[in-house]
Structure formats: C-alpha cells, structure tokens
Image: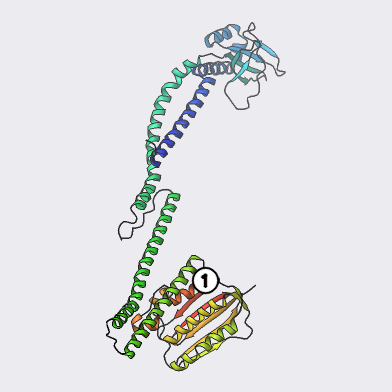
Amino acid sequence: MFSSLRSRLWLSYAFVITIALGIVAIVLFVFLIRNPLLSRQTQERLRTAQSLITSNPRDFIDNPDSLERLTRTYEVRVLVFNSARELVFDSNPNDPGLPFPRRNLLGRNSQVTMDASGNPWLYTSSRMQNGRLLVVAAPRPRVPLLNIFTDELLLPILEGGLIALLLSLVLAFALSRWVADPLQQVVVAARNYPKGSEEMKPVSPRGPREVQDLTRAFNSMVKRVNSTQRSQRDFVANVSHELKTPLTSVQGFAQAILDGTADTPEARKQAAQIIYNEAGRMHRMALDLLDLARFEAGTADLKMSSVDMGPLLRGVIEKFALQAQKAGVNLQVDVPSDLPLLIGDGDRLAQVFTNLVDNALKYTPTKGHVTLSAANVGNEMELSITDTGEGVPDEALPHLFDRFYQVDPSRAGGEKHGAGLGLAIVQEITQAHGGRISVRSQAGHGTTFVIHLPLAA
C-alpha cells in the first residue's frame, strides 16, 4: 500500500506531525500538572488577600478580628517577617512553620515552598512600608491526574489536535505531490523512451531544487543519447554511402570479367586496376574507422618518446614538394632550428601534418601558398598550416572535425576529398597527445589550422 514515494512521503509527514502534536500535548499536560485550575484559583485568592492587606496594613495587622475574617474568607495564612528575617506575626501559629521566602528570580506572582512537615504551600510576598515582608500563603491543592486530564486537557487537545491533524495531512499531501509528481514525470519519460524514431521532448523542471537538478540532468542525458543516436544513424548512412560507390565499381568490373564483356587484355587489365584501386580505397577507410574507434575508446597504441619536431615537419614538406610543384603551389616551411622536444608518437604526429598539408594542397589554387610554421608559446608549441585557398563557409566550421563531413563533396569529384575521416583522425591524435586543434577561415581568403601541443618537461 505504501510502496510509492508519494505515499511514503505522505506517511512520513503524517507521522512527524502526529509526533509533534503528541509532544505539544505532553508539554501542556506537564504544565497543567504543575499549575492546574485549582492552583490558579488559589493563586488568585493569594493575590487578592495580599492586595487588601498592603493597601490597608493597619486595618488588618493591628486588628485581629479583621485579619481573622480575611483569612477565613480567602482561606489563606498571613505571615510577617522583619528585616532580620525573623517571624514576627503568623495568623496560623499552630500550623507547621514556613521558612523565609526565597528570592523570586523569575518574577513569578506566586511560588511554592515546603513547611516544616514537608507539605507544599503556595505563597506570594511583598515589602511593606516599615521594611517588613508580608507573606500570604495557602496549601497547594492536590488534584488527581486523571481529573486534570479529563477536565482541562482532553477536550482542547481533541479539538485542536483534530483540526491541526486534518490541516497537516492536507499540507503533507500537497508537499508529497510537490516532490513526487516531478519524479513520476521523469519515470514516465524514461519508460517511454525511446518510442519509435522520434526524439523525446525535455521534461519541464518542477518541484524542489534537487528534483529540478535531477530533471535537468535527465534532460541533458536524453540530449546526449539523442545526439549519439543521430551520430550512429549518420555514421551508418555515411559508411553505407561511402562503401556503395567502390562496391558498385568492384561488382561491375568483376561482372565484366566474368561474363566476357572485358574481352581484351587491355580491358581486363583496366577492370582489374579499378577493382584494385577501389579495394584499396575501402581498405584505407576501414583502417581510418578502426583508428577512430581505438582513439575514442582510449585503446590506441601510441609509442611515446622524445620527438624533434623540426626534422619531422621538414620531412612532411619534402614529401609533398613534387605534388606542390605539379599543382603550381608554393609550399613553404617556417620552423626555427631551436625547437624543443615533444613527448609523443612521431608516426602519429607525422600523420597529423601529412593530412593537413595534403588537404591544404587540394584546396589551394595554382600560384597559391601553403605555409607550415612552428613557434614556442609559453609551455606549448604552436604549429599552424595556412593556405590561400577558397576558405570554408562559416556554417561549416563547427562540423569540420565530424566524421564523414565534407564541405561540398561535389566540387572536387569525391575522391579528391576522400571519405571525410581525415580531420576527425587529426583531432583524435591531437587530443591523445594532450593538445588541441582549432581552425579559422574566411571564404575566399584561405584557411588556417592551429595545433597546440604541450612541451616535454
């Protein structure tokens, strides 16, 4: 019955409220035991008698008949102490003696004292004009506890407690709903996700701050899951698209060899060459995908050692010297001779700059410039690859490092751009070395990739 959070919260609130009401009832009960109705009536008689005596002390202290009538009327005992705390007058001398009143620290109108026989008395005291102390006392009434409870406590506790309990239960129900309903909303959203191919809408944060934080965390998680699923769908679609063209070529030319369409040695050689090229293209894409998977999983095998970036960067430039000459592009390197060492995988770092320089050459027109430069910036090495090509549109910049992303696959014949995995691999290798990569570009004014790598300690 009380398995849900809402019912448990409601029961907890109701239990706490019941305990609080019980404590209040106990406190009232103790108060009434110490100060029941008869005691309050006795205190009122004491104060009245005291007021009469202090207003006309000679009419009572010096007049035994008047004092006797007063003590009988109000059922009190009158005592007078001098400044030496000696008893000089007692209206009931045959009763057990009462001590000198103690100082009233709490400012009470009446206090309790014990007589010589150990019986409790209620008394009130006041100073007279002649320096004497007037004490008016009466035996403290004894009332059975059950009578106190039934006469003075039961009815108000029942009435007030019932009203308070009903109001508190309503408040507890509202509080439990305030806490539990947003959580239930999150539970329903989690159960209904995923539902078909549509993406779930964010859950509106409600309730206490902690529940709102949980709802926001759930929305953030759903957003990441949606993004991951979109990436997976895009990945599958892109891989299928990239494999479709080479597979179609392989299948077509293999069929031509099988059915005799390629009936000359030259035709068969051409078909075999195309099949070989397309198979190599698929093999390279498979290796790139495997590299990406390893880097994202953190299992890439990096052979870390001291790397001298000067010779490495000059070697990359030399590799592309002939390609740049054929393309009519001026390939330059600006690397100081005193570059410090880096700790990294030399082969992987060479792969980074090979990929970036290759991209720069592809997009730089004849008589353009591609520059590879390096410099020390604080405790980092800054390496940049700048070209004077056509640049990248602003809307494409945030997606350059996404897998299979191509700014415009149609403008360079597809093969020139590859499968769109190069920059994604470059970013993964850079991050695996504790570095970061950024890009800035302006359409028609070229592109610059900047890599920051930490220097060796």
The answer to whether 18 appears left or right of 93 in the picture is: left
The answer to whether 193 appears left or right of 389 in the picture is: left
Estimate the x, y position of residue 137 in percent, counting from the top left. 59, 14
Q: Does residue 184 appear in the picture of this structure?
A: yes
- Image quadrant holding the N terminus, namely top left
Which image quarter: residue 164?
Answer: top left
| Vertical placement of residue 3 versus 75, above or below | below
Mark 1 element type: helix
> For this rendering, which residue is in front, 73 or 375?
375
Estimate the x, y position of residue 416 in percent, counting from the top left. 39, 84
| Vertical placement of residue 392 versus 19, above or below | below
> For this rendering, which residue is in front, 171 or 50?
171
| Vertical placement of residue 266 versus 284, above or below | below
Residue indicated by mark 1:
431
Q: Amino acid at mark 1?
A: Gln
Name the image colouring. rainbow
- Image quadrant holding the C terminus, namely bottom right
Q: Residues within 10 Å of mark 1 (few under 14, many from 20)?
A: some
The answer to whether 196 appears left or right of 59 in the picture is: left
Point 59% across, 84% down: residue: 310
Estimate the x, y position of residue 395 in percent, counting from the top left. 38, 76
Point 42% across, 86% down: residue: 362
Which image quarter: residue 92?
Answer: top right
Point 47% across, 74% down: residue: 425
Estimate the x, y position of residue 391 in percent, counting from the top left. 41, 83
Q: Does residue 412 appear in the picture of this structure?
A: no
> For this rendering, which residue is in front, 45 or 26?
26
Number of numbered discs visible in the structure rendering = 1
Tell which residue pokes out farthest to the right in this image: 84
The answer to whether 297 appears left or right of 415 in the picture is: right
> For this rendering, which residue is in front, 235 or 122?
235
